[in-house]
Image (cartoon, helix red, strand yellow):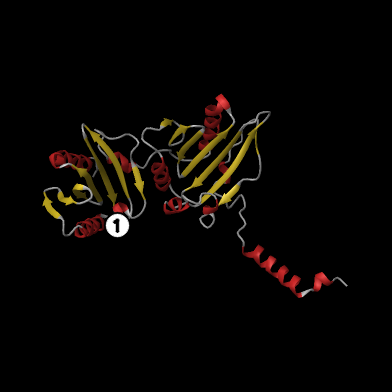
Amino acid sequence: MDLKRNHPVCLLMNFLLIAFLCISPVYSEEESSVKSLLPELESWTLVDSPQIYHTENLFEYINGAAESYISYGFKELIVAEYKIKDKDCDVVLEIYDMGDDKNGFGIYSSERYPDSHFISIGTQGYLEQGTLIFLTGRYYAKLMSFECGDETGDYLKNFSEKISEKVPGEHRFPSEIELFPEQGLVKNSERFILSNFLGYDFLHSGFTADYHLGENEFSCFLIVGKDEAEAKQMLEKYVKSKEGQDIKETPYGFHIKDRYYENILLARKGKYIFGVLEIDDSFKETGQKYLSGMIENVKD
């Protein structure tokens, strides 16, 4: 008699194993949004099966940063390692599906620096110390090379171009950042924040940009409501949240003397809320000029 086959504990273990297989997610190629983006390059082969991560297990790969990615609408990550023939050179790539183009720009813009070495890949990319990071549509990709020597840059660009070619549609930044005035703009400082903008959940998402004009440094921002009524409500709530501070109505909106942001200048046009932060007392007229510039950039 086969005692193992009929032992109650073994029967229970078999049941649990079957139950686990039934409820565990199985990720097929059709279900993966990123697997189809894996490049095929001559002389390069996959070292092992690519690893796929979702919101429930992303922390296993990027424990310290998982929450930030998830807060930007992260959907899926694929990690793959490639090795070139006859050389001790490896490239590891990570491709993050962030759900839509705006969220992709959000996480990309939160990790780039204005003085990075930018290159023309996808929407935008940059190189730094054996790593190429780029945005293409809703996908955020990181490529890391190991022991590739002087050919590192060429290898990484080849990989990134192959990935970007697989992403359909226009590869461009969100149109909203075109509303920021160009004079004094710190190039590549524009960011998109998906939630809790300026620390308030009722403001939901917004865009920011840094400015350096002479000796003055300040920031501009814009929030896009779903309609004019929502934008009006958000602005009223924000001004109300500043009660107890010096608030003045102005021809263009509001001027708030803030304990954290020094001077805040606010205006609204239709569904758009515009603001200028950290303006010095002697520089308020320039702040008003930038508010006017953003308003004028909105096409009726």
Judging depth in this view, the residue of 223 and 3 nearest the camera is 3
Quadrant of the rendered structure where residue 292 is? Answer: top left
Q: For the residue marked with disc 1, what is the amino acid?
A: Tyr
Crowding at dot 1, Cα within 10 Å, few <14 / some 14-19 / many 20+, comes out as: some
Q: As displayed, is residue 152 above or below residue 82? A: above
Q: As displayed, is residue 66 above or below residue 139? A: below
Please give the residue where the numbered disc 1 appears in the rendered image: 200
| Quadrant of the snapshot with the C terminus | top left
Q: At which x and y percent is residue 36?
A: 58, 44
| Quadrant of the snapshot with the N terminus | bottom right
Q: At which x and y percent is residue 15?
A: 70, 70
Quadrant of the rendered structure where residue 148 is? Answer: top right
Judging depth in this view, the residue of 84 and 64 nearest the camera is 64
Quadrant of the rendered structure where residue 40 is? Answer: top right
- Relative side of 31 to 119, left or right: right
- Relative side of 283 to 183, left or right: left
Q: At which x and y percent is residue 284?
A: 14, 41
Q: Residue at x 29, y 52 (%)?
A: 198
Find the residue positioned furthest to the bottom.
8
Find the residue positioned furthest to the right.
1
Give the total number of marks visible in the rendering.
1
Q: At which x and y percent is residue 62?
A: 51, 49
- Relative side of 105 to 224, left or right: right
Q: Residue at x 29, y 41 (%)?
A: 209
Tell me the element at label 1: loop
